[in-house]
Amino acid sequence: MNRILKTSVAEVKLLAHDFLRIEYIPGSRVDLPQLEEGLEAYRQLVGYNRFYLLSVTNQDVTITPRARNYWSTKKRHAVKIAEAFVIKNMGQMLIVNFIMQFQPPGHKVKFFQNEKKAVEWIHSLRGNKNKK
């Protein structure tokens, strides 16, 4: 089941039919074209189905203000059921907390410092969905 696609700034991996993982390359700069690349990779892996996303941001990943604003738009959040962020940089965490207060997306989002806990959270949500 594991399929992997690479974009100019990240690697996107299919973990399950409704669960993707994106890991940004250390030192990369993410702007609107890179977000669109990611969205296209998601579509190649899961089609137009909604999915859970694990986003891993490594050290020194820069996300432009345009990309941050675009991240919370309906086009971006309509495809996601929930998103777990693994953030390894305090500066990134401060920016994300600010965005969440003023531009929250339309899907569930939670932040973690390690990937194991992030994956557990996604699995708990997926488990609840499958019980309905």
Image (spheres, rainbow, N blue to C red):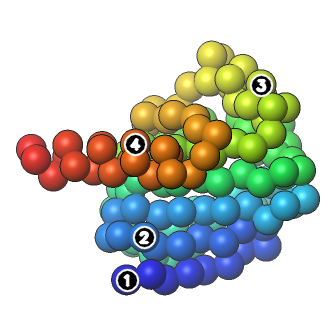
Q: Which residue is mark 1?
A: 1
Would you place residue 53 above or below residue 99 in this image? below
Which of the numbered marks, if any, corresponds to residue 15? 2
Q: Earlier in the sequence, mark 2 or mark 4?
A: 2
Q: CA distance from mark 4 to mark 3?
A: 21 Å
Left or right of 106? Residue 65 is right
Left or right of 41? Residue 25 is right
| Amino acid tagged 1 | Met
The residue at 47%/64% (across/down) is 20
Q: CA distance from mark 2 to mark 3?
A: 29 Å
Would you place residue 116 above or below residue 125 in this image? below
Percent coordinates x, y for residue 79 in the rendering: 43, 52
The residue at 77%/54% (across/down) is 58
Mark toward the viewer: 2 or 4 = 4
Q: CA distance from mark 1 to mark 3?
A: 35 Å
| Amino acid tagged 3 | Leu
Q: Which residue is mark 3?
A: 94
CB contact under 8 Å: marks 2 and 3:
no
- Residue 23, quarter of picture: bottom right
Secondary structure under badge 4?
A: helix
Q: Earlier in the sequence, mark 1 or mark 3?
A: 1
Q: Which residue is mark 4?
A: 121
- Residue 102, quarter of picture: top right
Q: Earlier in the sequence, mark 2 or mark 3?
A: 2
| Amino acid tagged 2 | Leu
CB contact under 8 Å: marks 1 and 2:
yes
| Amino acid tagged 4 | Trp
CB contact under 8 Å: marks 2 and 4:
no
